[in-house]
Amino acid sequence: MARDEGRLILVVHGRGGIQTQLRLPHRRLGQNGAQTSKDVVEAVTILARVCSDELIAGILTRSGLRTGRGNRWTKERVTSLRTYNEIPRYTVERRHAEGRMNLTQAADLSRIPKLAALFCPNQLDCNWLKETEEGQNSATTNYLALG
């Protein structure tokens, strides 16, 4: 028996000198079958920059994602996940300091219709959006261009 990158390698010796290798998954110290997937942790990391824990819980639940134990997401479970993974919580001050905004706020700032921002968030995809940006703040234009 030998360990190799999270796997157990078992060698079974049979009659006539026949050997069979079996590679079985092996949990490392501290791992168990009830861990939240890394994709969910990454999603919470990104969403925590612009959303509250309650909103994140709703997004994860509507997306069909579950906790490591198969439960639906609640505000308390998102808070626990953030705390365990040392993900900073959402605050309006932090969002402003990082220069982040949602599409509705970007539409208000650039004076374009809110529905246009929802259906065409990247100005390069819509020719008519270029016409409405004449005389607008270049920082706003660059922000919308980045999506």
Image: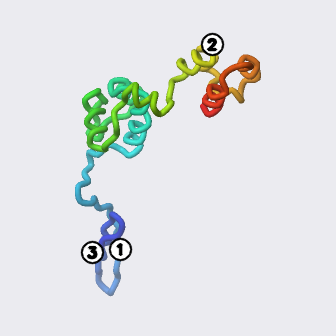
Nearer the viewer's eye, disc 1 or disc 2?
2
Check whether the beta carbons of the residues at disc 3 and disc 1 lie within 8 A of each other.
Answer: no
| Residue type at numbered disc 3 | Met
Q: What residue sits right under mark 1 in the picture?
A: 21
Residue 51 figure quarter: top left
Alpha carbons under labels 1 and 2: distance apart: 64 Å
Q: CA distance from mark 3 to mark 1?
A: 10 Å
Q: Nearer the viewer, residue 107 or 61?
A: 107
Q: Which mark is residue 80?
A: none
Closer to viewer: mark 3 or mark 1: 3
In the image shown, does 78 or 65 lie closer to the viewer? Answer: 78
Q: Point out residue 22 in the picture as x, y percentages from the top left corner.
A: 34, 70
Left or right side of 34 for 93: right
Q: Earlier in the sequence, mark 1 or mark 2?
A: 1
46 above or below 92? below
Question: Residue 68 at what x, y percent from top left?
Answer: 29, 41
For mark 2, give the secondary structure: loop
* Residue drawn at the location 27% of the way across and 49% of the way down: 33
Taking the spot 26% from the left edge, 54% from the top edge, the residue there is 31
Check disc 1 and give the amino acid type.
Gln
Q: Earlier in the sequence, mark 3 or mark 1?
A: 3
Residue 54: x and y in percent read 33, 24
- Mark 3, secondary structure of its residue: loop
Q: Residue furthest left?
A: 30
From what the image shows, is residue 81 above or below residue 143? below
Q: Quadrant of the C terminus?
A: top right
For the image shown, how many numbered marks are present on the structure?
3
Circle 2 residue = 113
Residues at marks 1 and 2 touching, judged by CB atoms closer than 8 Å: no
- Indicate which disc residue 1 carries: 3
**Residue 90, image quadrant:** top left
